[in-house]
Amino acid sequence: MEKKKKRMAIIASKGTLDMAYPPLVLASTAITMDVEVCIFFTLYGVDII
């Protein structure tokens, strides 16, 4: 039986520096736990990148 890989979607909705850390920390932690991660940046969240 094939085991499905775990996946996570994170929404970055604010572009301030203090709100940039939570989605990035969650994503990096999930990646180390072998979880496929996708971060979606809303209009205001695009300011992070």
Image (cartoon, grey):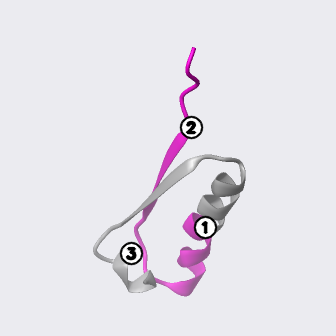
The amino acid on which the numbered mark 2 sits, given as a three-letter code, is Lys
Where residue 48 appears, x then y in whole percent?
45, 82
Q: Nearer the viewer, residue 38 or 45?
A: 38
* Residue bearing the label numbered 3: 45
Q: Earlier in the sequence, mark 2 or mark 3?
A: 2
Q: Earlier in the sequence, mark 2 or mark 1?
A: 2
Q: Residue at x 53, y 49 (%)?
A: 36
The answer to if 7 sits in the magenta stretch is: yes
Q: Residue at x 65, y 66 (%)?
A: 25
The amino acid on which the numbered mark 1 sits, given as a three-letter code, is Pro
Instruction: Using residue 46 as the reference point, say whether residue 1 is left or right of it.
Output: right
Q: Nearer the viewer, residue 24 or 18?
A: 24
Where residue 17 appears, x then y in whole percent?
55, 85
Q: Residue at x 35, y 79 (%)?
A: 46
**In the image, which residues are magenta?**
1-24
**How many numbered circles are shown?**
3
Q: Residues within 10 Å of mark 2 (few under 14, many from 20)?
A: few
- In the displayed structure, 18 sits above or below 31; it is below
Indicate which disc residue 22 carries.
1
Indicate which disc residue 6 carries.
2
Where residue 27 appears, x then y in whole percent?
59, 60
